[in-house]
Amino acid sequence: MIAHVSGIVAEKFSNSVIIDVRGVGYEVQTALGDYEKALLREEVKFYTYHHIREQSQDLYGFSSLAAKKLFELLITVQGVGPKAALAILSLAESEVVRNAIANSDITFISKASGVGKKTAERVAVDLHDKVGLALRYDNNLTTGESSVLSHTDEALEALMALGYSLNDATKALEGISMDLSTADRVTQALKG
């Protein structure tokens, strides 16, 4: 199993990034946001999911551990394969997608390429209790669409790195102020 790939971005095409790791090129399929952030000849690290089928082996890469865990949950849903899961994650930051699933926002989920209303409903029903609690954001945010975070939650990432599931990490952070430092939020979550 390939857990992560770190190296230099050698090439980019069709939502795939080729990462040169000491002379070996790994083709990693990514969500749109990660694809756009990966710059040619720059160092990157992707957490990977190694998908093995009878005819091929594919690597799916994510810039955050939370996105990888959400991808792994998405592909457990009947009718959602790796490409559909990647399309859902391409809608927005992984935290926004997770929150949409927690809120059973079928309209948002069905915006993904190749994901119809029935599949979006199945995703919401199967996963809304597995992705953690829906977060409430300040109403200061503009636009009428789903609240969009401009960053990933580093405290959530830290708890997942410590072995928490996505759901447990989200619950542990429930009610802890986002204004605190990442270290303070993690400390409070571990105490709670």
Image (cartoon, helix red, strand yellow):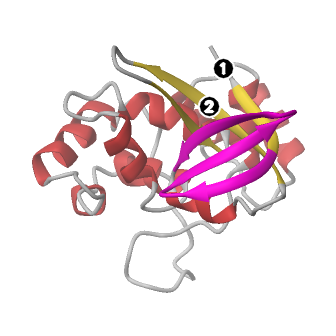
**Image side of residue 88 versus residue 159, left or right:** left
**Would you say the residues marked 1 and 2 are in contact, meaning their CB atoms lie under 8 Å apart?**
yes
The Cα–Cα distance between marks 1 and 2, rounded to whole angstroms, is 6 Å
Residue 96, above or below 4? below
Question: Which residue type carries mark 1?
Answer: Ile
Q: Which image quadrant for residue 113?
A: bottom left
Q: Tag 1's secondary structure?
A: loop
Quarter of the image that includes the N terminus? top right
Q: Which residues are magenta?
A: 8-30
Q: Magenta span: helix, strand or loop, mainly?
A: strand
**Res. 192 visible in picture:** no
- At 37% from the left and 18% from the top, the residue drawn is 53
| Amino acid type assigned to the residue bearing label 2 in the image | Thr
Q: Is residue 103 left or right of residue 172?
A: left
State which tag comes first along the sequence, 1 or 2: 1
Q: Residue at x 68, y 22 (%)?
A: 3
What residue lies at 13% left-to-right and 53% top-to-bottom? 117
What residue would you read off at disc 1?
Answer: 2
Total numbered labels: 2
Q: Position of residue 189 (x, y in %)?
A: 74, 34
Q: Nearer the viewer, residue 101 or 67?
A: 67
Q: Which residue is mark 2?
A: 48
* Residue 133 to residue 5: above or below: below
- Which is nearer the eye, 165 or 62? 62
Report the disc number at residue 157.
none
* Magenta stretch: includes residue 53: no
**Residue 134 visible in this rendered orientation of the protein:** yes
62 relative position to 132: left or right: right
In percent of width and height, residue 175 lies at 63, 47
Percent position of residue 45, x then y: 77, 42
